[in-house]
Amino acid sequence: MQDREIIQEFLVESAENLERLDREMVELERRPQDTELLGSIFRTIHTVKGTCGFLGFSRLGAVTHAAESILGELRSGRMLLDADLTSLILDSVDGIRRMLSAIETGEDEGPVFEQSLLERLHAAFDQKPQPAVETAAPKAAVKAATPETTAPAIEAPKAAPVADNEEAPSPHKESALADTTLRVDVNLLDRLMNLVGELVLTRNQVLQYNAAREDGALNAISQRLNLITSELQERVMKTRMQPIQVVWNKLPRLVRDLANTLHKEIALDLQGSETELDRTVIEAIRDPLVHMVRNSCDHGIEAPEERARRGKPACGNLTLRAFHEGGQVHIEIADDGAGMDPARLRAKAVERGLITPARAEEISDRAAFNLVFLPGFSTAAAVTSISGRGVGMDVLRTNIERIGGAVDLSSAPGRGTTVHVRIPLTLAIIPGLLVKAGGERFVIPQLNLHELIRLEGDALRTRIEYVHSTPVFRSRDALLPLIDLNKVLRLPALRNPEEASIAIVQAENRRFGLVVDAICDTQEIVVKPLGQQLKELNCYAGATIMGDGRVALILDVPGVAQRSGILAAGESSAREAAGGETGTGEGGERHSLLLCRAGRFARLAIPLARVARLEKISRNLIEQTAEGDVVQYRGTVLPLVPLAGMFGGGSGEDAELLQVVVVGTGGATAGLVVDEIVDIVDERATCLRASQSPGLLGSGVVAGKVTAFLDLDAVAGQAGFAGETSIARLREALLGEVPVEVPA
């Protein structure tokens, strides 16, 4: 029996060589005249063959020898490279990989001799075509050979014959970098990373102990320990970082084989292959990435004849792009294929019983695209070896979210589909914000955190508003729902009622405010997985040990949002952040709207971007002016516009507290008095109709119900309150600079 250490090193080297062969063979099919590339492929096979003989693997040596013989004929110009020969060599690579796998499991070369593969290699060598005969080379980077056409191939350049036993010199000079690198077992790196994690925890304990004392010597030692630990942590984490290219190396071969199977032409473009991630993250995204590429090839890019009918080039384009942004790695998988039809997606979801017909009518086009992430969803007409079972996209999203990432999908019918994945750089040690709630400590991952807000006294009472007893907080142009962490986790309320600490966080594409008892500090934490018995608690992503030795739970922000009802389980990717989007709705755009009841209208919509505040104003505070009712409001005079009187009806005239929507229009501010605040929605408006009624833009269907749209500018005109220009002229007149003009 051979020395297992030597065999192990042979297996590792051979696996690296075979990955390179996959990539280089696909590239050689595109550039058959590249003698340097062909020489590199020949030398790789020759290296594997030579080591096989040394270790006594005769069966593996026979396959590599046959493949090497064909490559030698290609180098000499006595054989020509075409699509069939490329496929045969790639099949040889697969056969070699299978035999290596058998050797790794201790079965020598395995029970299968790869006899059929060896016979195919010998037959191809014996029936080599003459150089005068030309066969086609692919037109694209990855191209399918269609059964209907056989085009001539480009003749490979002739080179001097190469003997079977030639270790041929490389045209490139050996890099000195090879002498400075060392192959290390990943298990050793994982163990080293765990030890560094424990060192970080100890460092945190020392720093906390030092902070409570005034010892100059201890302070100097702890600071030195802090610097060394931080640098060691950074260096060890770098040893675990790998370029995403280690995943992308497999994709050219995958796309080529899929293109052949599906009779399609596909050009693959890989951008940002040098982008680095932690090894554990790379392992987590490997299968999801392959699944997305398979989907793009199968469902996305059309067959050449279909693309021709649509006026597209016969060769489809598949682009993968990776880049760093905002402390995360972003990966985009985009194709220029058929795209997705929202109506068809809704129909398929109803057909498979995943959503109700009523729900299908309500969801927006953007939400319809994300139906593909529901378990059991598939648009395939039949089950094939590639797709059709409705298993994959839901698992893909689950795997991405499990490592703290998010996946989103956008599509344009006839133009293509883009999948956008956001993932953290590493999972072992992450920055986090330490907060307190109900007497316990929790950690919010930094990647979910946007900003911190503290409210006290009057600010607490005025900046937090209520819609149907649900607290909301206005952050710039958006009303964000607030979640009390104590209530979600069923902890006792211990905070001062006159104070509120709010962490603005994001789950998927939805932002909200997380109300906690206190915000402590940011720390780099070592992530410890939860025990199997706690896996069902979706509001926790793990745990960590703090400086005092106590355990703090790491919050899973999407899980907290689902538990509170902000996000529905299984539909989180379909929700969007409440923002200031407005539009006609013709292009499937979503509207952020405040819905209210006023006069004869049960549903009256106001663009949320124009809403400044929601107030309840006592009727006793109303004062009379020549222009109408006003109140003194935040140092200004706020004109009140009773919509019930404007649109007919007198509901709420006897109420002590008036429901007032403070809006901005024409540079001024006014208070719209309504009968009731109904809801805040972020939906797509359909079935739009223009209106000739004063004060209305028109009507449409919002969230399944007919809704009238308020024309704020027209309402301002009818109410007669001043705009920005009139106010400016009034101020000038009061200073004696210009006379006040009385309107006719």
Image (cartoon, rainbow, N blue to C red):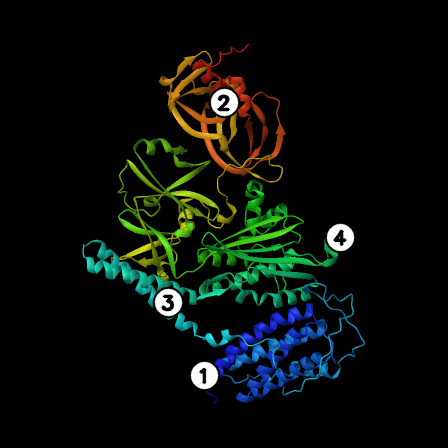
Q: Nearer the viewer, residue 272 or 497?
A: 272
Residue 461: percent from left, percent from top = 33, 32
How packed mark 1 is, by other alpha carbons closer than 10 Å (few <14, some 14-19, many 20 or more), is few
User: In this figure, which residue is indicated by the disc labeled 3?
Assistant: 193
Task: Identify residue type, mark 1.
Answer: Glu
First along the sequence among labels 2 and 3 = 3
- Asked where in the image residue 44 lies, by quadrant, the reply is bottom right
- Distance between the Cα atoms at labels 1 and 3? 24 Å
Task: From the image, tell me which residue sits under label 1.
Answer: 5
Residue wearing tag 4: 309
Identity of the amino acid at label 3?
Answer: Met
Q: Earlier in the sequence, mark 1 or mark 2?
A: 1
- Eye-nearest disc, 3 or 4: 3
Where on the picture, by quarter, is residue 518? top left
Q: Indicate the position of residue 691 as horizontal and vertical percent values.
A: 61, 25
Helix, strand or loop at disc 4? helix
The residue furthest left is 214
Q: Are marks 3 and 4 in contact (CB under 8 Å)?
A: no
Task: Check the image and report above or below for 743 versus 410.
Answer: above
